Amino acid sequence: MEGTLDSGQYWQGWPVDAPVGVVVLVHGVHEHGGRYAHVAARLNEAGYASYTVDHPGHGRSPGKRGNIESVDAAVAGVAALVAKAADLHPDVPVFVYGHSLGGLISLTYLTGDPHPRVAGAVISAPALDTSASNAVQRVFAPVLSRILPDVGVLALDVEAVSRDPKVVADYRADPLNHNGKIVARTGAEILAAATAMPARLRGLTLPLLLVHGGDDRLMPVAATDLVRTHAASPDITVRVWDGLYHEPHNEPEKAEVLSEIVAWLDAHRVTDAPSRQG
């Protein structure tokens, strides 16, 4: 199933009969929700309905390619889809599964005003490490974002996405991916949201599964360590996969990775979600 939100953003879903839970998948920068069809299929096998939304400027959603407009706009899309999924499946818990930029967007959503049925989150390689930016870049990023929002500022190493050559080749060939540089607006939005996140995490008490590839060259494991250090949740599981690259769900070991994620979801299927804010 598929449709558009009031914002015009494209969403798609993979429902199942009598689901045991719902998972909203939140994709990363320059990709789109369709790249998670195999993740949704594995979740479907375990009884979970799955839904995803393309961020502004990504996939089938409107906007300049690669320009997310704002993290707030992306969070609003996730919030709208979570509400829709919760309405479609009224008697089961809802989980958020965010990868990379999607992890940052998910954490921003979860530390704001999440839906009361959200019972936990899987956060994969969240875009939280800002160590590569210097003081000058921090000062001028907002300015460049305003005057030249669509200018490319940072190239991504697609080879670092996965150790599987087919995944890399498919990524390059996918017309719904953006293969240009990260644009100024998106970069500035990521920097601002990541900088604000440590303080926001102090109010996050939901159960968390943090997943990261040990050889991730696009986002260091320090980003996951930051969540573990600052989040107030008493229930945090960290799984760093030695040797894996940026997308654990797209590595040769993906079956094992997804099985562990399903096991964590199964262990956290509760009808009444715990308090989110401390």
Image (tube, rainbow, N blue to C red):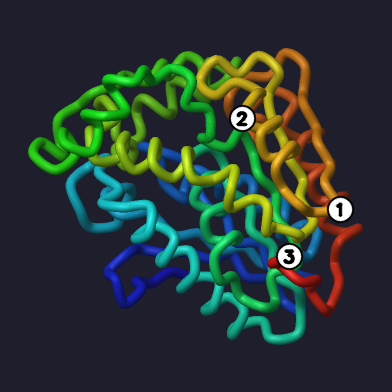
- Of the two numbered discs 3 and 2 in the rendering, the one whose residue sits closer to the viewer: 3
Q: Nearer the viewer, residue 122 or 222?
A: 222
Type of the residue with mark 3: Gly
User: Residue shown at 49%/51% (left/top)?
Assistant: 105
> Distance of mark 2 from mark 1, alpha carbons?
19 Å
* Circle 1: residue type: Pro
Lower position in the chain sequence, tag 2 or tag 1: 2
Which residue is most to the right? 267
Q: Gap in Å between the C-alphas at discs 1 and 3?
A: 11 Å
Would you call the spot at circle 2 few (<14 residues within 10 Å), some (14-19), or many (20 or more)?
some
Residue at 8% of width from left, 39% of height from top? Answer: 147
Q: Is residue 162 left or right of residue 144?
A: right
The one of 82 and 262 positioned closer to us in this rendering: 82
| Circle nearer the N terminus (1, 3) | 1
Mark found first going from the N terminus, 3 or 2: 2
In depth, the one of 73 and 33 nearer the eye is 73
Please, is residue 275 above or below residue 251 in the view? below
Tell me the residue that label 3 is attached to.
278
State the mark number for residue 234.
Answer: 1
Q: Which residue is mark 2?
A: 223
Identify the residue shown where x is 58% and y is 48%.
Answer: 199
Q: Are marks 3 and 2 in contact (CB under 8 Å)?
A: no
